[in-house]
Image: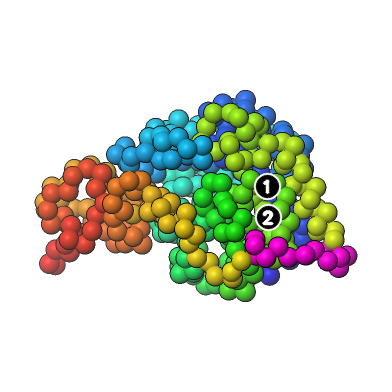
Amino acid sequence: MALLQLQDRLVGDEQPVLLVAECGINHNGSLDMALHMIDEAATAGVDAAKFQLFRARGMYTPRAGRYRTATGDMVPIYELMEAMELPIEWLPELSTRCRQRNLKFVMTVCDEWCVEQMAQADFDCYKVASYELSHVPLLIELARRDKPIILSTGAANIADVVRAGEWLAPDGQRPFALLQCEAAYPAQPAELNLRVIETYGRLFPNVIPGLSDHTEDPVRAPVQAICHGAKIIEKHFTLDRNLPGADHSFALDPPDLARMVQAVRAAEDDLAADRHIEIDEQLAGSTVRKLAEAEQMLREFAYRGIFSVEPIAAGDTLSRENIRVLRPGQLPQGMHPRYYPLLSSGKYIATRAISQYTGLDWDDVLVPAQ
């Protein structure tokens, strides 16, 4: 197994499991709450706190429609994302608090703009969310950087995962982490397929495997995951599951986060001492990375495509100013992001008028004769 180096902390074979509190968007737009989350995560005993950097305009179109949250509420997805944007001005304070509490500072980055903003920040590791697994321009940009990278693989098939690995590490040498994930919130135990963690370890010699766990139980899946070779466990975290917001209801509160830490460390001790931990066959499932039934809708809603971001007239040149890689929401998805470097190169023109916020297809574009 490869090793991932987060400054003075190694992650991988013969190393303690890296436990990550996914604070995500559960700061509810409050810096004080975000700092309090770091304090509570450190008290619970995790190794890292993770937040998300994005801008709604770089994620969805304003016409993306509504999204059903874990609480069953149907909310305008663009407005939800706008409300949860993390201000750039918070980064120094979040970083400082993580350092003070001896936590690694991990940041989810959702597009190239986010990567550029993080270039001046003091942090330890990039995280790529499941829905950015096919965001080729983002992966290309991350491949240029020297920070460690963790990818989640919810709503993906194995071909998606292999292609992402090839974009991040074309030579097959750069180490990175792959987290098995069932993308639904909350995830159903029977759909976890924890044996995929073993598959990732065998498939990529340069991969550190792990689990991003969306189930509500604080102990069951994390303990089982390390029996299948997970070296990273990520769990959503909240100060209070009753707080308003999309991601609080299924997240762990501080007492449950502490329970998870204690259970994982005890299981690590058991494994090190060759004490038997019985495999939970319901959680173990298949070795095949495949879509759970609940993930199909999420894939259609959130896996990215190429969209117009302003009206494009017939004969106009396509460019980074008028097309962008975005999540579709309830719109038709558009072409795969792997074509974005090609279509934004200035060599393609629109064959017909394309309205703003439309997913592009091949009938929309033409390479002019040279």
Element assignment for label 1: loop
Residue 102 at what x, y percent from top left?
Answer: 75, 41
Q: Where is 243 relative to 299, above or below?
A: above
How far across and how far down the image is residue 283, in percent?
A: 65, 61
Q: Is residue 104 above or below residue 254?
A: below
**Segment colored magenta:** 271-284
Query: Could you tell me which secondary element the residue under label 2 belongs to?
Result: helix
Name the amino acid type tagged 2.
Answer: Ala
- The 10 Å Cα crowd at callout 1, few under 14, some 14 to 19, many 20 or more, is some
| Residue ID for mark 2 | 221
**How far across and down, in percent of the image, does residue 165 sit?**
51, 66
Q: Quadrant of residue 79?
A: top left
Q: Name the residue carrying label 1.
A: 217
Disc ID at residue 53:
none
Which residue: 61% across, 66% down? Answer: 285
Cβ atoms under marks 2 and 1 closer than 8 Å: yes
Disc 2 versus disc 1: distance between alpha carbons? 7 Å
Task: Name the residue rendered at 66%, 40% in the picture.
Answer: 252
